[in-house]
Amino acid sequence: MDGQMIRDYIPSFVRGRGRFTKSQRRAYQRLYDKYCIPFREEKIDIKKVMGFPEVIAEIGFGMGMVTAEIAERNPHVGYLGIEVYKPGVGKLLSEIARRGLRNIKIVHEDAVKVIAFMIPSDSLKGVHIFFPDPWPKKRHHKRRLIKEGFASLLCSRLEPGGYVYITTDWEDYARQILLVLSKTDGLENAYDGFAPPQDWRPTTRFEKKGYRESRRVFEILFKKI
């Protein structure tokens, strides 16, 4: 199933997005070997590599400020950040060093490939996906990350009782995600419909801008049964 999904997969990102600043480049060059896990097309013992009995993956962490804050609040949990854009990787690397965090590792690659090829079944405590690209034009909906094949893949990588938590401020995408996850075997909605705000999640800069523009944030939380 993983192989077929990869063959049919349409990337949800566009290469080359964002400016790679000098400070981000320096951090990438200086800290990559210390905090990054090179991508490979083989399973790794993610808990052993991370050095923690519980590992949570964040897909598409952007500039990584929320990732760093969550990790700093939960030093007993390992956080695996997965990001395809180099500027974000460089920024989070510098933030890890600045805060002295020991519980974050990064894979700089397409998240679908990382989850499919590197992450073993039943190994993740949770998956966070904060504000994935909504691809609002109808002709681009096929590029949206959360589709049936990927939802099933995520479920297979969660340990029993693990969770997937997604936020978006696009209502039609939120309803699509809710429908897709509801139809995924092995996942169960933790709430009746959308989830209430989770007080452990810091507010992103993007989210604050949305509040100023009166955009609602939709939160979706499913658990593996």
Image (cartoon, rainbow, N blue to C red):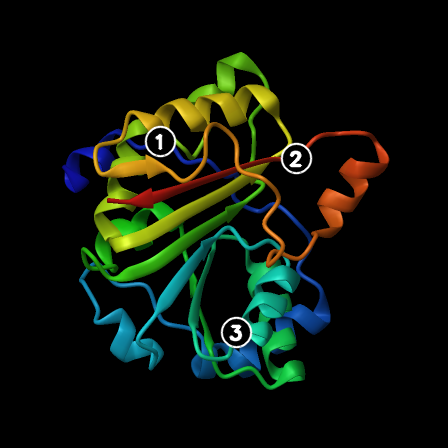
Query: Residue sitting at 44 percent across and 81 percent down?
Result: 33
Residue identifier under label 2: 217
156 is higher (above) or lower (below) than 37: above
Picture residue at 63% right of the left edge, 70% below the top: 25
Query: What is the CA distance from the residue labelled 1 to the residue labelled 3?
Result: 27 Å
Q: Earlier in the sequence, mark 1 or mark 2?
A: 1
Q: Amino acid at mark 1?
A: Leu
- Secondary structure beneath dot 1 equals helix
Q: Say which label, 3 or 2, has the lower sequence index.
A: 3
Q: Residue at x 70, y 52 (%)?
A: 203
Residue 118 drawn above or below residue 181: below
Report the residue at 24% width, 62% height from top: 123
Q: Amino acid at mark 2?
A: Val
Position in image of residue 88 (x %, y %) = 60, 59
How many numbered circles are shown? 3
Instruction: Provide residue 214's location: percent of width, then percent of height.
Output: 81, 29
Q: Is residue 73 left or right of residue 179?
A: right
Where, quadrant-wise, is the C terminus in this rendering? Answer: top left
Tell me how far mark 1 sits from mark 2, CA to CA.
18 Å
Q: Is residue 4 left or right of residue 180?
A: left
Q: Are marks 1 and 2 in contact (CB under 8 Å)?
A: no
Q: Secondary structure at mark 3?
A: loop
**What residue does disc 1 label?**
181
Q: Nearer the viewer, residue 188 or 3?
A: 188
The residue indicated by pointer 3 is: 74
Residue 98 or residue 22, whichever sits in front? 98
Q: Position of residue 94 (x, y in %)?
A: 64, 76
**The N terminus: image quadrant:** top left
Farthest residue, direction right: 212
